[in-house]
Amino acid sequence: MLLMVASVLLVVTLNRWVVKSVDSRVFAGINALPENEVGLVLGCSKRLASGRINPHFQARIEAAAALYHAGKVKHLLLSGDNHRVGYDEPTDMKESLMALGVPAEAITLDYAGFRTLDSVVRAREVFGRAKLTLITDDFHAHRAVFLAQHKGIEAVAFSAQKVAVNRSARSRVREVIARVKAVADLYVLRTKPKFLGDKIEIQIGNRSQCSESKVV
């Protein structure tokens, strides 16, 4: 019984720490959000098992497009999973953003964003970004900033439009455990990304095509 109580207290304490330590760096309104050259869009599956569009994917894409068109970011780095044939989060994001008017030359793809830790570390180590706007769901934003700051990135986050709780309850519960895992990854396990690779420069401005980072 005491072990169970201690475990619950640990989970609650670590969650409060992750959220409170970065709360001032998470924004829900575009007007208050600081400008950055690059926005890092954190990937997720485009479709649910039912075949319907994933509301979390849709919310992140709409948020990223809104920030680009508002001039809050000049370029979007799309980081997601492409671990098997037929599953390609970065390309799905690119196509959806282009459908919302974001030009290809303002997009860079990262195919090795298998988890949030990988995405933020690769953004700094592979793509050379020391300042970022992270674009993701409201419940995910604090953990993303927490990880990014620990990895030497001056980060803020923009929370996409909130997905209704009845459609996101499972993800929100998982996030509670994911925050604990993030602390363990940073301070106990010293977890590293699955892949890094050659450095790639994100060129802001005139470009003829988007850069793409394949897993190496």
Image (spheres, grey):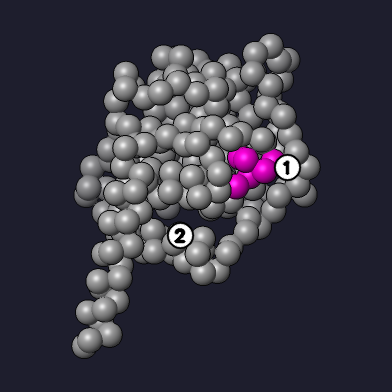
- What residue is at 42 percent from the left and 34 percent from the top? 156
**Quarter location, residue 201:** top right
Q: Quadrant of residue 181?
A: bottom left
Picture layout, residue 174 above or below residue 214: below
Report how many numbered discs are placed on residues in the image. 2
Q: Is residue 181 left or right of residue 152?
A: left
Q: Earlier in the sequence, mark 2 or mark 1?
A: 2
User: Given the current orientation, which residue lies at the most extreme top position?
Assistant: 206
Q: Which mark is residue 182?
A: 2
Q: Is 60 covered by the magenta stretch?
A: no
**Relative depth, front residue between 81 and 191:** 191
Q: Residue at x 27, y 38 (%)?
A: 162
Q: CA distance from mark 2 to mark 1?
A: 25 Å
Tell me if 50 is positioned left or right of 170 in this view. right
Amino acid type, callout 2? Ala
Quadrant assignment for the N terminus = bottom left
Dot 1 corresponds to which residue? 214
Read off the magenta span: 120-126
Q: Which marked residue is nearer to the observer: mark 2 or mark 1?
A: 2
User: Can residue 17 be seen by looking at this rendering?
Assistant: yes
